[in-house]
Amino acid sequence: MEIRFLGGAREIGRSAVLVNDSLLLDFGMLTGNPPQFPVGSPDPDAVVVSHGHLDHVGTVPSLLSGDDRPPIYWTPPTYELALTLARDTLKLHGGSYRCPFTENDIKRVTEVTETHGYREPFEAAGHEVTFYDAGHIPGSAHVLVDDGDTRLLYTGDFHTDDQRLVAGTTARPDADVVVCESTYADVEHDDRDEVAEEFAQSVKTTLWEGGTVVVPAFAIGRTQELMLVCEAYDIPCYVDGMGKQVTETLRQYPGFVRDADRLRRAKSHARFVTGREGQRKRIADQKAAIITTSGMLSGGPAMTYIPEIRSNPTNKITLTGYQVEGTPGRELLETGSAEIDGRRMPVAAQVEAYDFSAHADRDGLRSFLEPYRDAELLIGHGDRCEAFAAELRETGYDASAPELGETRRL
Ligand SMILES: [Zn+2]
């Protein structure tokens, strides 16, 4: 087997791995200014996508812009989320270098799609492929690829602990080679229930004091997780941005969430914002939590809410995910002010951060890899892939961190 790393090697974003020059695993986008896309202009015979996050699926429609029509394999929720993301990218950046595909390419995605559930082997570009539940977001998969000689496990993003929205991964299929993510290789998460408890008490305190809490959250996974927390703690909440549509989508796939009934209750507990007739400005005065995109304050309805609530120190902003360097969210955490919608704004409202991660931490990664002591480990999707690979080597693993564009023969 030959594997080429076209993205997500010693970095987070634009994940893409080409197997035997024919089967492409993921084709993501690294958001930023400018955005970055996978290298190498691959021409695959088939595409397999691990899950519906932008950094794994964001560039997929561009594979259909030429004469070739490779089939695309994914789980049903991943397919739906990919379409939602593609349409959003087209709406925001269509016609510019930031959107490497057209409406027509997105239409072609709907023509070449083939969905598969977990543990149902199928054939793709001459390889046997099987999805296993990765416990990251609904529909997320570990991808096992067998070319007849070598079994490759591409972990995708995964979590070993249960979240409210999805249960942690338990699948450990036999493999000769593991391409493993390492997002939180140097982090130990606090106990998730304690994080939820702290978050809930902090939000409630602000509401008792008469304040409003803006909860910036990623649309896919995080928004629904926070809706579940708000329902469990009876926190009045609004939901705004792309997370609304994603919630509706996920409700169509009860088999891919941990507790469909709980998600239904969380949905009826929350109020979805239409944004019509100044509704956002009115909501910004209410004693409620507002769960809204974008999670790093780089766009979305959060751009309306933050200016409205920022000058009152009774109000609060609770960041709920990883804040990439250079984003307004990161800047706000570190300096207490941020550039929102092109304007520098000091923020008197309280700013807090909570770790609701959907990735395995250091211990989770280690426990996941324990059954793969005899396999070759290729570490990617992280800010310190080489360091983590070195740590694994010290404990007896055969581990390394491929470079961007590198080809490995196995
Ligand atoms: Zn992900």
Image (spheres, rainbow, N blue to C red):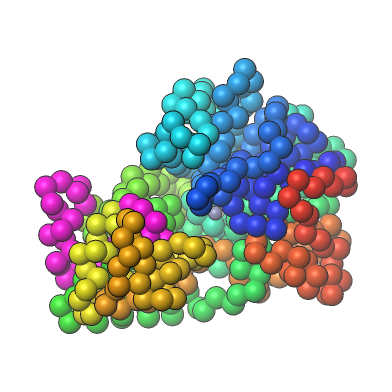
Residue 223 shows in the view: no
* Residue at (68% x, 41% y) in the render: 39
* Residue at (62% x, 27% y) in the render: 71
Residue 362 placement: quadrant: bottom right
Residue 408 among magenta residues: no
* Residue at (11% x, 47% y) in the render: 277
Q: Main secondary structure of the magenta part?
A: loop
Residue 146 x, y percent position in the rendering: 78, 40
Residue 333 placement: quadrant: bottom left
Left or right of 404, for residue 321: left
Residue 199 x, y percent position in the rendering: 36, 76
The answer to which of 248 and 173 lies nearer the viewer is: 248
Regarding ligand 1, which quadrant of the image does it lie in?
A: bottom right
* Residue at (70% x, 50% y) in the render: 154
Q: Which residues are magenta?
A: 273-300
Residue 144 x, y percent position in the rendering: 71, 46
22 lies above or below 233: above
The answer to which of 138 and 68 lies nearer the viewer is: 68
